[in-house]
Image (spheres, rainbow, N blue to C red):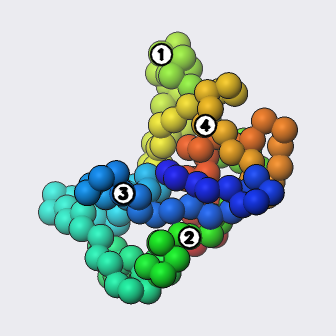
Amino acid sequence: MHADPDGDGVSRQVLLSKYAGRERYWAFALEALNALRQSAPARTPAITETPDSLELAGEGGTLAIPAPDTTQRTLWINYAGPDGTFPRVSFAQLLEDPGAADALRGKIVLLGVTAQGTGDRLFTPFFSASGMPGIEIHAKDRKST
């Protein structure tokens, strides 16, 4: 994810695409959504670009994400709540209690660092002195979709 905080230091938008040289990288959340929508085993991970949106084909039809190329494919972040809104299961928990994996069954699982001091925390409209982990910014409450 690449977030450019606003002038006040708060992250409100995310770039859905970023270039490094000639190589394009899609945002982690966009890649996760694209993978979720694909039917196994015939996965077609292509993301189609139009001037006004990014389109993801998949089960249930095409999903158009409004991200115009005139805005460099930025998207407003739809925060579900403050830091800690989503359940967290640590690797240590899984090693100590394999049954803890039951809480993850049937869910999309994003792996990332949440510890303070890792440099991957951003200030959000749900301000907290320590910021929100980047991995949690990628998460979205599926109940609201």
Name the residue that disc number 4 marks. 120
Specify which label sits upstream in the sequence, 1 or 3.
Answer: 3
Measured in 3D between alpha carbons, the distance from the residue under mark 3 to the one under mark 4, in whole angstroms, is 20 Å
Q: Residue at x 56, y 70 (%)?
A: 75
Q: Is residue 56 above or below residue 81?
A: below
Q: Is residue 68 above or below residue 134?
A: below
Q: Secondary structure at mark 2?
A: strand
Name the residue that disc number 3 marks. 19
Q: Is residue 101 left or right of residue 76?
A: left
Q: 75 or 31, which is in the foreground?
A: 75
Q: Amino acid at mark 4?
A: Asp
When asked about the image quadrant of residue 141, the answer is bottom right
Q: Amino acid at mark 1?
A: Leu
- Disc 4 packing (10 Å; few <14; some 14–19; many ≥20): some
Name the residue that disc number 1 marks. 95
Name the residue that disc number 2 marks. 75
Q: Residue furthest front?
A: 21
Asked whether residue 81 appears in the rendered view, the answer is no
Q: Is residue 67 left or right of residue 38?
A: right
Measured in 3D between alpha carbons, the distance from the residue under mark 4 to the one under mark 2, in whole angstroms, is 19 Å
Q: Is residue 55 above or below residue 85?
A: below
Specify which label sits upstream in the sequence, 4 or 2.
Answer: 2
Q: Nearer the viewer, mark 2 or mark 3?
A: 3
Q: Amino acid at mark 2?
A: Leu
Q: Residue at x 56, y 31 (%)?
A: 113
Measured in 3D between alpha carbons, the distance from the residue under mark 1 to the one under mark 3, in whole angstroms, is 37 Å
Specify which label sits upstream in the sequence, 1 or 4.
Answer: 1
Return the x and y of residue 45 as percentages of the image width and height. 24, 63
When asked about the image quadrant of residue 119, the answer is top right
When asked about the image quadrant of residue 41, the answer is bottom left
Specify which label sits upstream in the sequence, 1 or 2.
Answer: 2
